[in-house]
Image (cartoon, rainbow, N blue to C red):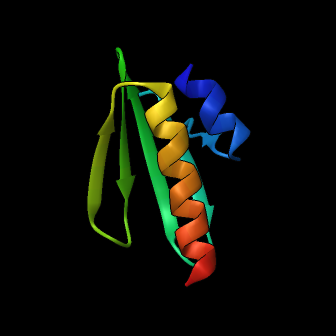
Amino acid sequence: MFRKVLLRHGFRRNRRSDELQYIGHWDKLGGIYVTLKPKMAVVEVKDRNAIYVFRSARELELFIRDLKTSVNMA
């Protein structure tokens, strides 16, 4: 389920990583790395030095939407 959310928002699989990882890049925010683990998604926003952990796809979806709107507003 996490995979569908990430693909819907333009994230792509990082094939260089040993883990199941997806990458997104936005001009105003930089790189966003999402590592999928059993029953959780770990989101790392490099420019903000922040790490977020999500246990449901709905939480991840809402976070990405809010992040996109906050970046576009700034």
Which residue, as the protein is rendered here, is positioned at the far bottom? Answer: 74
Q: In the image, what residue occupies the spot 55% across and 39% down?
A: 61
4 sits left or right of 34 in the view: right
Q: Position of residue 35 (x, y in %)?
A: 40, 35
Image side of residue 72 versus residue 20, left or right: right
Residue 48 lies in what quarter of the image?
bottom left
Q: Is residue 35 above or below residue 44?
A: above
Where residue 10 appears, x then y in whole percent? 71, 47
Residue found at the far top of this picture = 38
Camera-nearest residue between 26 and 64: 64
- Can residue 42 be seen by looking at this rendering? yes
Report the side of 2 relative to 5 (left or right): left
Of residue 17 and residue 67, the one placed in the foreground of this image is 67
Residue found at x 38% / y 45%: 43
Look at 65% across and 26% down and name the residue there. Answer: 4
Q: Position of residue 44 (x, y in %)?
A: 36, 52
Residue 18 in view in this figure:
no
The residue under the point 62% across, 33% down is 5
Quadrant occupied by the C terminus? bottom right
Q: Nearer the viewer, residue 20 or 4?
A: 4
Number of marks in the image? 0
Residue 2: x %, y % from top left: 53, 26
In the figure, residue 45 lies in which quadrant?
A: bottom left
Location of the N terminus by quadrant is top right
Relative height, residue 49 to residue 58 (above, below): below
